[in-house]
Image (cartoon, helix red, strand yellow):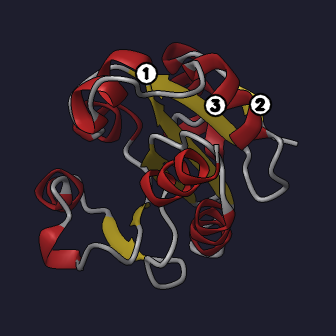
Amino acid sequence: MGEVVSREALIARLAPGARGDRTVALANGCFDLLHVGHVRYLAGAALEADVLVVAVNDDASVRALKGEGRPVLRAEDRAELVAALRTVDYVVVFSEATVGPLLTSLRPDVHCKGTDYTVETVPERDVVAAYGGRTAIVGDPKDHSTRDLLARLARTS
C-alpha cells in the first residue's frame, strides 16, 4: 500500500541521494470516483519505473478543471483511495493549475500521462524535457471517465 505524503516529505525521500539507483515515475490526475480506467493508467505508469508517485489535484483545482459540483470526494479521500492501489508507492496532493511545479521540484525520470494525450500534447512535456526526463503515454484507451459514470448514475436515480 502506498503512502500519502506532503510535497516536502516526498522531495526529501526521492532526492537524488536518497533514491539511490531507483527510477521514479510520476502520474497525475483528479481521480474523482476511482474507476477501472484510473487503475489501468496507474498500472501502466508503474511499469515505467521502480517507484510510482501519483499527484492528485486538490479540491479547488478539480473544481476549476471540472466545474461546479466537483470533486465528488475530498482530496484527502481521493489520495487515500489512490494510495491503496498496490502499484502506487507515494501520493501527494497538489494545488497548482498543472503538475509542472511538482515535476520541477521532484524531477522524476518519467512523467506518465493517459492515452487521451500524445507525447506532443502533454502540457508539461517541455518541463520534463528541460531536466532530462522522458514522457510516457500509458494505460488503456480512454473509454472510461468519471463524467460518464456520474451521468449514468444521474440517469438511474
In the image, 6: left or right of 67? Answer: right
Residue plotted at (23% across, 39% down): 100
Q: CA gap, disc 1 to disc 2?
A: 17 Å
Residue plotted at (26% across, 73% down): 117
**10 Å crowding of disc 3: few (<14), some (14-19), many (20+):** many
Q: Callout 2, which amino acid?
A: Glu
In the image, 61: left or right of 5? Answer: left
Q: CA gap, disc 1 to disc 3?
A: 9 Å
- In the rendered image, which residue does mark 2 sit on? 3
Q: Quick one: SS at disc 2?
A: strand
Residue plotted at (38% across, 75% down): 136
Mark 1, mark 2: which one is toward the viewer?
1
Label ID, residue 128: none
Image coordinates for residue 132, horizontal then vertical, percent = 25, 62
Q: Are marks 1 and 2 in contact (CB under 8 Å)?
A: no
Label ID, residue 78: 3
Q: Quick one: SS at disc 1?
A: loop
Q: Callout 1, which amino acid?
A: Asp
Find residue 72 and report its image quarter: top right
Q: Are marks 1 and 3 in contact (CB under 8 Å)?
A: no
Q: CA gap, disc 3 to disc 2?
A: 13 Å
Most foreground residue, 107 or 29: 29
Residue plotted at (19% across, 53% down): 124
Image coordinates for residue 108, horizontal then vertical, percent = 43, 51
In the image, 88: left or right of 139? Answer: right
Count of marks overlaid on the render: 3
Mark closer to the chain start, 1 or 2: 2
Where 120 falls versus 112 (above or below)? below
Where 19 falls versus 47 (above or below)? above
Find residue 6 and report its image quarter: top right
- In the rendered image, which residue does mark 1 sit on? 58
